[in-house]
Amino acid sequence: MSLPQPTEAPASFNGHRVAVVGMGIEGRDAFQFLVREGAEVITVDRNPRRAMRAQEDLSLLHGLDALIASQGVPWDSALLVEAATRGLPVFGPTQVFLERCPSNRVIGITGSAGKTTTTTLVHALLSRAGVDCVVGGNIGRGLLGQLPDISPDTTVVAELSHTQLLRTTRSPQVAAITNITPNHLDQFDWDDYQALKYRIVEYQTEADRVALPFDEPRAAHASRLGPAATTWFGIGEPPCRAAAYCDRGRIFRIDHQFMDADELKIPGQHNLRNALAALAIVGDLVSDRTAAAVLSTFTGVPHRLELVAELNDVRFINDSIATTPERTLAGLRAIDGPIVLMLGGRDKRLPLDPLVDELRGRVRRVVLFGETGAAWAEWCAGLGIDAHHAGEFASAFAESVGSARAGDAVLLSPGGTSFDAYPNFEARGQHFRDLVNALRQEGSPADEC
């Protein structure tokens, strides 16, 4: 089945009968927006307690003028496919926002990894520099709900996922792609997934700008897909004039040394790349002095290599955002010392092969949990890697604590999604935090550590 073709929303939804499908953050925002515009709104969700109609009820399509589907609703769900068959337009909240937004500078940031940290950093840099700005999108805060607070002079910083770009026919004035690596192959084929990432530049004009990594070929390819000017960033000696790069441990902005890489608070080469992306995106809106003040104090985003506690010389690190093996690899490489790794969740059909060297070299023990735990335990056993499937999450945590020694890190960096047991990765990360805090209250990560 081919991906849906996006279409422009009407100039106003006043008097239209519209169904909002998926009543999470985006859905609630869309509902309030439509009410403000004078639409008759029907709310739809898989959970009947959250909405007027159930998502499985195709009869709700009768008499509708349009649907707005949240990004979490599968594009090939029976309801949306049937709507398209009947000729009903299906809009995404991001598309409606980009059409209605009065801002002269919308910054859109996408990528397979790093987009939340980069978005957060960009917003922090602009805020510290005194720029009137708002942040939203895939970062956990809706965009449509902020429309009343946005003026032409407001800078909008938007994290955009591939599913938010699925139904867009507009691009932000400033776009950025942190990287493109295999992800979500349980929902999209590889070509379609890449095409959705590239959509962020598809509708840019010559007056627009895109920030891209010179050392990530798939993301760099976006420079050939539109007329926008390219701003480059990356690690290593740049092959062209770059707005931000790190070479031999020194960070440069354009042609002058700016700060040393070891002055960054956030750990790991992937976070160094996120910092460089943020510097390239903000450009000359932020001075060196302001940028250095932010980067030298920014400690990261929750659930992304978050140090929850250090108990009896054992560090407990929450990297629940790591829903792919590649992100787990980045987490492993960012941490010093031996590691007890909590790995598991739901498989995205991505190969675990990139983890082999780290699992054999620096990981003391792999403790598996969740839906994919048994299969991944078998894979580890076949490679001679010390691993055990502990079952559900709390049992895996307890086993990890029992396996840890002084100087170790107990790292939750699952490599799989949370949807086998949790509504999202944040809930899984919070469970990890709660278990660590309970351990703290007991007064020991186990005296045996």
Image (tube, rainbow, N blue to C red):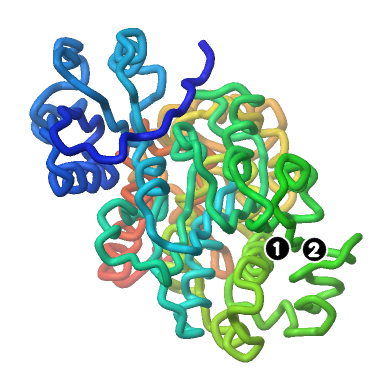
The residue shown at (69%, 41%) is 355
Residue 336 seen in the current view? no
Residue 124 horizontal side relative to residue 392, left or right: right
Q: Is residue 281 above or below residue 199?
A: below
Picture coordinates of residue 264 (x, y %)?
63, 78
Picture coordinates of residue 197 (x, y %)?
60, 39
Pick the front one: 123 or 322: 123
Mark 2 sits on what residue? Answer: 235
Location of residue 8 (image quadrant): top left
The residue shown at (64%, 53%) is 178
Which residue is at the far front?
11
2 and 1 marks in contact (CB < 8 Å)? yes
Q: Looking at the image, is mark 2 or mark 1 earlier in the sequence?
A: 2
Q: Is residue 24 above or below residue 108?
A: above
Give the amino acid type for the residue marked by disc 1 in the picture: Gln
Picture coordinates of residue 255 (x, y %)?
84, 79
Mark 1 sits on what residue? Answer: 269
Secondary structure beneath dot 2 equals: strand
Mark 1, Cα crowd under 10 Å, few <14 / some 14-19 / many 20+, is: some
